[in-house]
């Protein structure tokens, strides 16, 4: 689903935000991307949905390679990948329902089914009763649910989330996490960036990838296999090619 | 369909912003319009003065009629010559009597007509520069029966210099005004697009195609440019009318200029919008 192959992203004069990072997240996996502020989490997510390109290496996301997908074709990838931000990014002048319908309209869905589909998506995230409320009148947790419903509009196979609970209290955070697990249970891969290690610890079933100063320093799956079979490092570095 | 609906919706959602940017475009183009009005009228004035440039070839009394007519035909055949008029001795006297009444008695009491006949040569517009005038004058001087050729050399030189300075000033100032207008329009459009950058980025994020996102903005840019252009035209016309009515007689700018102004306002509105939108399309 998501594959980073020796990815480096260097910013002119600022050094490497990502340094030779490789990992592979398979279909239906739930993974956390953790690390201190500035460790490169956002950069990694931007590379994955191709808002940005690697300086070296390659990203592959549901069949789209960063080497072969031109700027003009990025929209195809975007329809396979949902994206959720820390600050929700809803359109302020519109209702919850309109915000979701908007995503359906601009991706060229037939207008006849849009209303019903937007309503169904809001039901899926547990927000059907608030469909008519203005985005700005909703609580943070509710706004994030609208954002998730919007991200689901294209029925993506991958959900990317950048600190989605960063602005939420414990209760709302729990609700959003439950929703992510529900979506994951339906077969969606989830990759969520967070610096909240306590939150990560509460979800032991999820895979954990840790970045530190742009380097991948921990992968719970690798750690598990290393413990059981003591695999050598060489395999990991050649597996990408 | 979506394009048009979205463009109209954008106006309805933020009429103030759209109105404001159209007003900015309008004022920017108004300055250009005023400049065009001034330039056009100055040019007309200069042209009307230039029309008076003529070469007068005085004919000896001994000249034969057929010689004169042949010379007239030959001069008329020159490409830079617009017309050649023969003023006979009698006509010259007539004109002198009319134009110089203070000498009236002097001219009526004459036994012989002292005034020579002449050929008055008019040059085509655009060919009234000093070199051409010289050349045609020299050509006329070649006829043996021509006594003298006059054309107010100093006057021709001055006028030509004035014209060159005018043309250069107009080009430089016109370019400067157009550039300032372009910058202002660009800024106005950027502000309007900036206000909706979130929308652009969200559309891009959920997988809208660039063209689909851009189109309503381009239509809006065209409408803003057109509205601004119309406003500038109205303001310029208002100024023209007030000057014409209360100050002095001026000419309205040629229709092509007005059309060109509207067109460039519209085209530039579209162009600037495209640039502004592209910036946000590239961000995500
Ligand atoms: N567009 C950019 N231009 C220059 N440097 C950048 C850019 N984007 C990110 N960086 C740098 O890359 C590094 C990693 O940034 P990134 O945003 O990926 O960190 P992060 O792990 O998401 O941090 P946080 O937890 O604070 O969100 C930082 O040092 C940052 O300054
Ligand atoms: Mg970040």
Image (cartoon, rainbow, N blue to C red):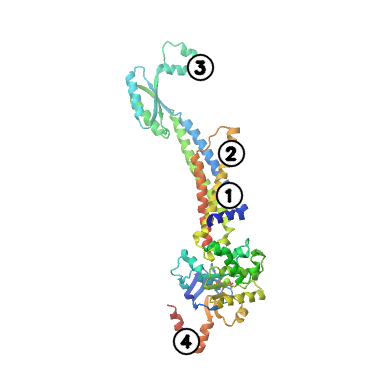
Q: Nearer the viewer, residue B92 or A64?
A: A64
Q: In what quadrant does ligand 1 lie?
A: bottom right
Which label was assigned to residue B22?
1
Q: Label 1: state its secondary structure.
A: helix
Can residue A37 be seen in the rendering of this structure?
yes
Disc 2 and disc 3 in contact, CB within 8 angstroms: no
Instruction: Chain letter for mark 2, please.
Output: B
Q: Position of residue B119 (x, y in %)?
A: 39, 23
Which label was assigned to residue B217?
none
Which label was assigned to residue A231?
4
Q: Residues within 10 Å of mark 1 (few under 14, many from 20)?
A: many
| Distance between the alpha carbons at the discs numbered 4 and 1 | 67 Å
Q: Residues within 10 Å of mark 3 (few under 14, many from 20)?
A: few
Q: Which of label 1 and label 2 is nearer to you? A: 1
| Distance between the alpha carbons at the discs numbered 4 and 3 | 122 Å
| Distance between the alpha carbons at the discs numbered 4 and 2 | 85 Å
| Distance between the alpha carbons at the discs numbered 2 and 3 | 43 Å
Disc 4 and disc 2 in contact, CB within 8 angstroms: no
Task: Please tell me which residue is depicted at 65% across the width and 72% down the height of the picture.
Answer: A168
Instruction: Chain letter for mark 3, please.
Output: B
Q: Residues within 10 Å of mark 2 (few under 14, many from 20)?
A: some
Q: Is mark 1 within 8 Å of ligand 1?
A: no
Which label was assigned to residue B239?
2
Q: Which residue is mark 3?
A: B101
Q: Position of residue A23 (x, y in %)?
A: 49, 78
């Amino acid at each position: 689903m998501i594959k980073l192959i020796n990815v480096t992203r260097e910013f002119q004069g600022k050094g490497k935000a990502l340094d030779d990072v490789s990992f592979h997240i398979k279909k239906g996996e739930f993974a956390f991307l953790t690390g201190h502020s500035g460790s490169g989490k956002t950069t990694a997510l931007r590379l994955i949905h191709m808002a940005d390109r690697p300086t070296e290496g390659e990203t592959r996301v549901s069949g789209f390679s960063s080497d072969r997908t031109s700027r003009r074709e990025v929209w195809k990838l975007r329809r396979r990948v949902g994206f959720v931000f820390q600050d929700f990014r809803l359109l302020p002048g519109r209702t919850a329902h309109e915000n979701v319908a908007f995503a359906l309209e601009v991706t060229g869905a037939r207008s006849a089914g849009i209303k019903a589909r937007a309503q169904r998506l809001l039901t899926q995230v547990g927000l059907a009763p608030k469909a008519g409320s203005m985005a700005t009148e909703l609580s943070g947790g509710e706004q994030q649910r609208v954002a998730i419903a919007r991200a689901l509009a294209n029925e993506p196979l991958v959900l990317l989330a950048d600190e989605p609970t960063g602005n939420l209290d414990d209760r709302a955070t729990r609700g959003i996490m439950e929703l992510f697990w529900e979506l994951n249970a339906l077969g969606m891969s989830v990759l969520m960036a967070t610096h909240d290690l306590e939150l990560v610890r509460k979800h032991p079933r999820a895979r954990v990838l840790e970045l530190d100063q742009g380097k991948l320093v921990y992968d719970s799956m690798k750690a598990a296999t290393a413990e059981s079979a003591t695999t050598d490092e060489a395999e990991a570095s050649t597996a990408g090619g | 369909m979506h394009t048009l609906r979205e463009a109209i919706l954008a106006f309805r959602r933020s009429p103030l912003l759209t109105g404001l940017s159209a007003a900015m475009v309008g004022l920017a183009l108004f300055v250009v319009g005023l400049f065009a009005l001034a330039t056009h009228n100055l040019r007309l004035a200069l042209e009307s003065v230039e029309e008076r440039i003529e070469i007068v070839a005085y004919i000896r009394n001994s000249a034969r009629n057929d010689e004169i007519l042949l010379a007239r035909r030959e001069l008329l055949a020159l490409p830079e010559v617009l017309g050649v008029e023969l003023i006979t001795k009698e006509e010259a006297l007539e004109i002198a009597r009319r134009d110089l009444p203070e000498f009236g008695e002097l001219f009526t009491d004459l036994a012989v007509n002292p005034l020579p006949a002449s050929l008055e040569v008019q040059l085509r517009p655009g060919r009234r520069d000093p070199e051409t005038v010289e050349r045609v004058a020299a050509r006329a001087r070649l006829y043996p029966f021509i006594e003298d050729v006059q054309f107010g050399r100093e006057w021709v030189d001055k006028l030509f210099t004035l014209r060159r300075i005018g043309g250069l000033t107009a080009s430089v100032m016109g370019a400067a005004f157009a550039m300032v207008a372009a910058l202002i329009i660009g800024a106005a459009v950027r502000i309007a697009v900036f206000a909706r950058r979130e929308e652009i980025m969200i559309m891009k994020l959920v997988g809208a195609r660039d063209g689909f996102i851009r189109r309503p903005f381009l239509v809006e840019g065209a409408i803003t440019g057109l509205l601004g252009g119309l406003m500038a035209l109205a303001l310029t016309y208002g100024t023209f009318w007030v000057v014409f009515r209360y100050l002095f007689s001026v000419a309205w700018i040629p229709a092509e200029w007005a059309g060109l102004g509207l067109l460039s306002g519209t085209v530039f509105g579209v162009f600037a919008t495209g640039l502004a939108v592209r910036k946000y399309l590239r961000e995500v």
